[in-house]
Image (cartoon, helix red, strand yellow):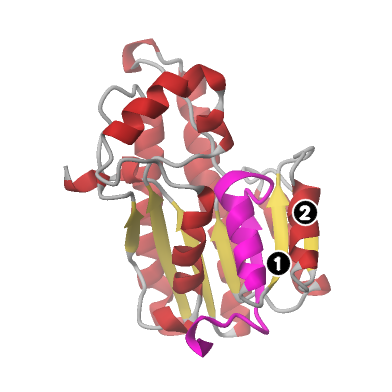
Amino acid sequence: MKLFDLSGETALVTGAGSGIGQAIAVGLAQAGADVACLDRAGSPGLSETVSQIEAAGRRALALEADVRDGAEVEAAVQRTESELGPLTLAVNAAGIANATAAEEMGEDQWRHMLDVNLTGLFLCCQAEGRAMLRNGRGSIVNIASMSGSIVNRGLLQAHYNTSKAGVIHLSKSLAMEWAERGIRVNAISPGYTLTPMNLRPEVAEQRKIFEETTPLARMATVDEMVGPAVFLSSRAASFVTGHDLVVDGGFVCW
């Protein structure tokens, strides 16, 4: 389908060293895009992501940066354009998660969560948006969470929920600012997903609860976030902006 063809596009994916970010980076390449893959310094999976993209016949670039550092993010965008071409697509998947009771949470833990998940994502959108505004068009997809719209029963994560709610509203705000200048901005809100964090042995019992409470009776695989990301990045979604696409197996219906 030509509607979903990303040939000729240059993409930047943050959090591309593992989990959802890695799957989407490879998926964009399989749809035809050249992909710059950004993750924190020392990310063990970054080289694997690049290898998979190159195996798909597309060009790839490994980038290390702290998303909390605007100068590092800006440099990553500039290098992407220098080596791969004008930036037209971006998916921001870099993020962290942990849990602590609100009354026991230290200020440093709260700030770190918001710094990475919200401020870091804004700095990425800002640098990507500047490039796309120069190029006259673009699509940005931000990975939020269903936890930005609901409060997950039994999970003590006020800081995480708040950060992801911010991602959803930031995406809508940027969509409205840039709508008339050729840039679409959308969010994807995954439900419970089999990322490396959720595959740890110590959360095995919690995974059972996630599966039992999801209408489709299972958790998502990271690959199930690829189709939504390709859709929102492609011409198939040319009239879609400011949208939060919930991909949760029906969880929020209950």
Q: Can residue 196 be seen in this view?
A: yes
Vertical side of 35 occupied by 71: above or below: above
* Magenta residue check for 5: yes
Disc 2 packing (10 Å; few <14; some 14–19; many ≥20): many
Left or right side of 76 for 125: left
Q: Nearer the viewer, mark 2 or mark 1?
A: 1
The residue where tag 1 is placed is 35
Q: Residue at x 68, y 84 (%)?
A: 8
Q: What element carries label 2?
A: strand
Vertical side of 44 occupied by 142: above or below: below
Q: Where is residue 181 in the image (x, y as percent from the top left)?
A: 46, 83
Q: Nearer the viewer, residue 89 or 54?
A: 54
Q: Residue at x 58, y 65 (%)?
A: 90
Under mark 2, the amino acid is Leu
Q: Position of residue 215 (x, y in %)?
A: 24, 44
Q: Nearer the viewer, residue 43 or 247?
A: 247
Q: What element carries label 1?
A: strand
* Magenta residue check for 99: no
The mark tally for this picture is: 2
User: Which stretch did the figure color magenta?
Assistant: 1-30
Q: Which of 98 and 53 is in front in this view?
A: 53
Q: Can residue 79 be seen in this view?
A: no
Vertical side of 113 occupied by 5: above or below: below
Left or right side of 136 for 41: right
Q: Which residue is drawn at 49% across and 47% down?
A: 221
The residue where tag 2 is placed is 63
Mark 2 touches mark 1? (CB < 8 Å): no
Residue that lies at the very extreme toward the bottom in this rendered image:
2
